[in-house]
Image (cartoon, helix red, strand yellow):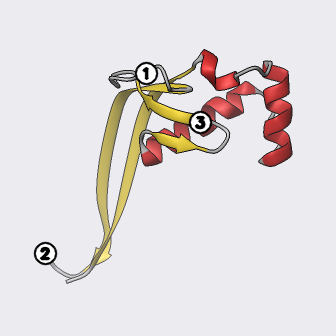
């Protein structure tokens, strides 16, 4: 049997950039560095969206331009540059095509 399923996942995620996120850089310096090594961004909202995308897809971990990310429920939060809280998650599945059930 073989079927094609469309899965839609919608997550609401709260993102917090900690003091460790910027290190010794100002916000403007960070954005300038980010633009040099990755792609130009219009502002911090683009960085927040990138952080949300990375944790929504991959969960906690270390990501370029973000550093160490982790849940607000993590035991050791001192090393985190980005904290996140998954507020909600909705998942829907739809069979697009395939054989009989």
Upstream in the sequence, badge 3 or badge 2? 3
Q: Earlier in the sequence, mark 3 or mark 1?
A: 3
Rounded to the nearest angstrom, the CA distance separating label 3 from label 1 is 13 Å
Which residue is pictured at 33% across the width and 22% down the height?
73
Compared to 87, does 90 lie above or below?
A: below
Quarter of the picture holding the N terminus: bottom left
- CA distance for labels 3 and 2: 46 Å
Q: Residues within 10 Å of mark 2 (few under 14, many from 20)?
A: few
In the image, residue 100 above or below residue 40: below
What's the mark number on residue 67?
3
Tell me the residue at 62%/39% (across/down): 50
Quarter of the rendering occupied by the C terminus: bottom left
Q: Position of residue 64 (x, y in %)?
A: 64, 44
Q: Which residue is mark 2?
A: 101
Total numbered labels placed on residues in the image: 3
Indicate left or right for 14 with 45 as reference.
left
- 2 and 75: which is toward the camera: 75
User: Hey, which quadrant is residue 10 in on the image?
Assistant: top left
Label 1 Cα neighbours within 10 Å, binned few <14 / some 14-19 / many ≥20: some
Mark drawn on residue 77: 1
């Amino acid at each position: 049997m073989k079927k094609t399923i469309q899965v839609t996942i919608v997550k609401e995620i709260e993102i917090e950039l900690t003091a460790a996120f910027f290190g010794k850089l100002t916000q403007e310096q960070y954005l300038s560095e980010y633009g040099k090594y990755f792609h130009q961004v219009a502002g911090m909202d683009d960085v927040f969206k990138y952080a949300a995308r990375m944790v929504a897809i991959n969960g906690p971990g270390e990501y370029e331009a973000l550093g160490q990310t982790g849940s607000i429920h993590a035991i050791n939060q001192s090393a985190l540059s980005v904290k996140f809280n998954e507020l909600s998650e909705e998942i829907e599945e739809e069979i697009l095509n395939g054989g009989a059930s």
